[in-house]
Image: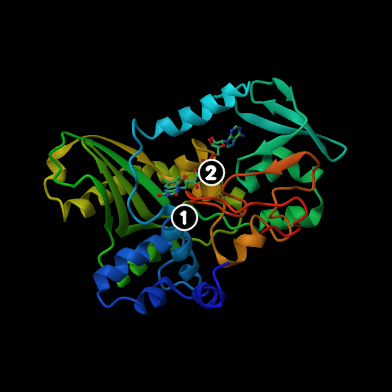
Amino acid sequence: MMGGKDMMRIVRGIPMTADEFVDEWFESDVVKAAIASLGIHGLTLGVYGAGTGYTLMHNWANRGGLSHVAVQGGIGKISESLASAVKSFGGEICTNAEVKQIVIKDMRATGVVLSIGEEISASNVISAADPKHTFLSLVGAMELPPEFVWNVQSIKMRGSVAKVHLLTDGKHGIPDGTVALAPSIKYLEKAYDAAKYHSISEKPYLEVTTSGKVVSIHFQFAAYALNGRKLLLHLDTNRRTPELWNEKREVLADIAVKTLAEYFPALNSSIVARHIITPLDLEQTYGLTEGDLNHGQIMLDQFMFMRPIPGWSNHKTPIDNLYLCGSGVHGGGSQRGKRTECSEDSEVGN
Ligand SMILES: Cc1cc2nc3c(=O)[nH]c(=O)nc-3n(C[C@H](O)[C@H](O)[C@H](O)COP(=O)(O)OP(=O)(O)OC[C@H]3O[C@@H](n4cnc5c(N)ncnc54)[C@H](O)[C@@H]3O)c2cc1C
């Protein structure tokens, strides 16, 4: 519906690097970096990475830019409104109810088993957990066609985002709203180098959201698989990562504060308490496999009709009555805006 000219510009921009993309439009390195930074937000790629032209467009279009819009009454109001809508239709909501298994009988989902042992039967099961967690842990490889399992195992989850929340006395000097600490294109690319070598950036790209006394720092890059070796086996890294992250937790927060304090020196003496969320915490506390914010990297071989895997972008799964929603499917993640409609007869999604 965009017309040939605009569509051509989009198709041309998709495989470009974020650097090349902004270079065509802007002269100032500071402006280029601020705009390009969103192209690598949540992604384990640098601004010189092919395909970050696509994520640049995706993230700007879906997030509406860098700033985080304040929700009247606090962000929790969104969940509360959704919950009351469900209840108004007679729905029941269970929280603190971890699903341990999706029950499958003859290739058909019949319900779920909670970690406390309770079984809930259902005519349809819709999972918003990420595709790897849903298929490999909750359904189980034995229930699925081998080629499908192989495709799911191949989904790239590469979290490298950490969060540092600071409670301050309010005298930090940082303006309310969003500040992107991305001084140059080269700075962003160098920050990414750390993720490439499975470590923590000494000079990270930070996206800082401030509201009164609370300063929330989005930190890139901090590799989920903290070790000097290439990530080969998911299970293998799981054995080594927890100990390493426990050692590095405070180191990460120190780097975040030191980097930010270079621009806002009053921050140091203003801090009252800090809460650190490592990529491992994102996995263990929030259920995000490998701490990947988007339930799978948003990259060219994992987007649109190939999300979560080729041929399965329309929310259906090989198991009848089991559907996948959430960021791992086409449209996500970081999708604040309207999602594309899916039609019943579309085999490879929209
Ligand atoms: C640090 C961080 C920064 C981000 N920044 C932005 C941003 O600036 N802008 C933006 O648009 N997006 C951002 N995102 C991404 C955004 O949060 C996601 O796109 C969005 O939350 C996806 O929603 P979802 O419902 O698909 O998945 P989720 O929000 O991940 O919800 C999945 C739910 O399933 C639950 N779950 C998982 N396994 C089980 C189980 N076995 N049993 C029961 N429950 C289970 C989880 O606890 C979770 O509540 C960010 C994410 C993170 C983590």
Q: Is 34 rendered above or below residue 280?
A: below
Label 2 CB sits under 8 Å from any ligand 1 atom: yes
Q: Which residue appears at 49% of the width and 49% of the height? A: 293
Which residue position is annotated with label 1? 62
Where does the N terminus fall, quadrant-wise?
Answer: bottom right
Compared across the picture, whether 87 is left or right of 148 comes to left
Residue placed furthest toward the right: 106
Q: Nearer the viewer, residue 95 or 117?
A: 95
Label 1 CB sits under 8 Å from any ligand 1 atom: yes
Q: Nearer the viewer, residue 324 or 286?
A: 324
Looking at the picture, which amino acid does disc 2 mark?
Leu
Where does the C terminus fall, quadrant-wise?
Answer: bottom right
Locate residue 218, reporting x and y percent.
Answer: 35, 49
Instruction: Kindly indicate the quadrant of the structure image that contains residue 78.
Output: top left
- Whether residue 93 is visible here, answered yes or no, is no
Q: Which residue appears at 41% of the width and 71% of the height? A: 18
Q: How is the image coloured?
A: rainbow
Instruction: Kindly indicate the quadrant of the structure image that contains residue 36.
Output: bottom left
Q: Which residue appears at 25% of the width and 69% of the height? A: 30
Marks 1 and 2, how far apart in space?
A: 21 Å
Q: Which mark is residue 288?
A: 2
Compared across the picture, whether 28 is left or right of 134 comes to left
Label 1 SS = helix
Locate residue 214, reporting x and y percent.
Answer: 25, 37
Locate residue 3, reporting x and y percent.
Answer: 55, 73
Q: Which mark is residue 87?
A: none
- Whether residue 281 is visible here, answered yes or no, is yes
The numbered mark, 1 or 2, whose residue comes first in the sequence reads 1
* Residue count near mark 1 (Cα–Cα under 10 Å), binned few <14, some 14–19, many ≥20: some
Looking at the picture, which amino acid does disc 1 mark?
Asn
